[in-house]
Amino acid sequence: MAAAAAPAVGLESPAVIGGPACPAEARFQFGSIDDYEMVEEIGEGTFGVVAKARDRRTGETVAVKWIHGGEGDGEDGAARLRAAVLREAGCLDACRAHPSIVELRGVAADEATGDLFLVMEFVGPSLQRRLTGPFSEAEARACMRQLLGAVERMHGAGTIHRDIKPDNILVGAGGALKLCDFGCASPARPLGKAYPERRTGTTQYNAPEQLMGIRCYGPAVDMWALGCVMAELLIGMPLFMGCAAEDILVQLPMGPEAFDGMLSLAGREVLAGLLSYNPCERLTAADALKHRWFAEEDAAKPPAAKQSTLPRRPCPQQHGIRAAHGGGCLADSQIG
Ligand SMILES: Nc1ncnc2c1ncn2[C@@H]1O[C@H](COP(=O)(O)OP(=O)(O)OP(=O)(O)O)[C@@H](O)[C@H]1O
């Protein structure tokens, strides 16, 4: 990122930068990275660096993400990297104008190197950094309402995030949450069409079908991740520990009854719906938001007085992954 002032150069055509055309390129007019002055680095991940920056033209503070790698060297690597940046931008753009999804301001290019940068609204620290202890049920519910709203919008736009976790949720003014890092996001594939990658995202938040290597999955993987986030809000630590799929799989089943005493019945119903092993039975974002947990004034009433409002669908042995997959959604042959 250039630190010195430089005349703004409008890079309005992909041809100015070179490299093979990507379908997403047609949607973006590239600005110049010289329009942004780096203030400080605020985050570094496996594939990119995020910096707080100042827009020289308006004085506005923004976040600029430089995606540098994991895509290999040479022309092929550069082309793949470029496609990855534009895919992330395209997925973010598809979900624009939602208060709980980080806003993409544009794509900027470094004319000298050909590097592309995502320019976003600057939000604030990640939820990961704010999660220093358990949240109350009311706080967890307020967070989940926002996150489910974001995911409802994202899935409605045909996008799957595939890496929802506290590290990829930003906390803005007044505690407003915003989903960020669409680096693993993808347009949802038609039912039965496999994703090329064996597994994406972060193991502790991967759904059972992803952990098992099944490549034909759907938006329900994000709902499982939201269940993990909800549990993490309530216990103040990740629900599942370990880095390998095998480590997580042995920790399953992990029933919502473990939350007895810290969560109302309505809250446990939502958690159970999100952490349903069978992706076909997992709550959608829209259905979760309709649950009475979000309407109740006092979700902490004694659970005995309440009745379940979750639809009950027959699913024999629903506490076993294999049994759940035997329910007609995913066949063993889909295991990659
Ligand atoms: N718009 C933003 N406003 C403020 N901070 C941000 C913004 N976007 C990202 N960050 C910060 O930068 C960190 C890394 O961002 P992001 O997850 O997008 O990068 P990444 O390279 O894909 O990371 P990873 O490899 O860990 O997924 C975030 O956790 C957050 O702390």
Image (cartoon, helix red, strand yellow):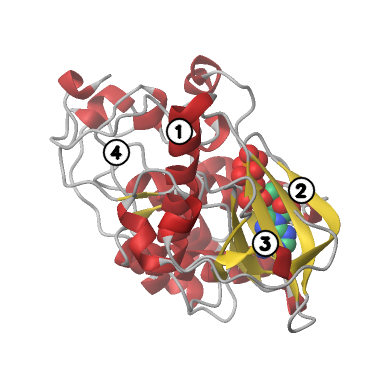
Disc 2 + disc 4, Cβ < 8 Å: no
Q: Is residue 179 visible?
A: yes
The quadrant in which residue 212 appears is top left
| Residue that numbered label 2 is attached to | 43
Camera-side residue: 80 or 144?
80
Identified at 55% across, 34% down, the residue is 202
Crowding near the residue tagged with mark 4, few <14, some 14–19, many ≥20 C-alpha atoms within 10 Å:
many
Asked if residue 176 is positioned above or below residue 196 in the image, the reply reads below
Identified at 51% across, 44% down, the residue is 163
Three-letter residue code for mark 1: Thr
Q: Earlier in the sequence, mark 2 or mark 4?
A: 2
Looking at mark 2, is its residue's CB closer than 8 Å to ligand 1?
A: yes
| Residue that numbered label 4 is attached to | 278
Disc 3 + disc 1, Cβ < 8 Å: no
Disc 2 + disc 3, Cβ < 8 Å: no
- CA gap between label 1 and label 4 equals 19 Å
- CA gap between label 3 and label 1 equals 29 Å
Three-letter residue code for mark 4: Asn
- CA gap between label 3 and label 4 equals 45 Å
Crowding near the residue tagged with mark 3, few <14, some 14–19, many ≥20 C-alpha atoms within 10 Å:
many
The percent position of residue 199, horizontal first and vertical second, equals: 41, 28
Identified at 74% across, 67% down, the residue is 36
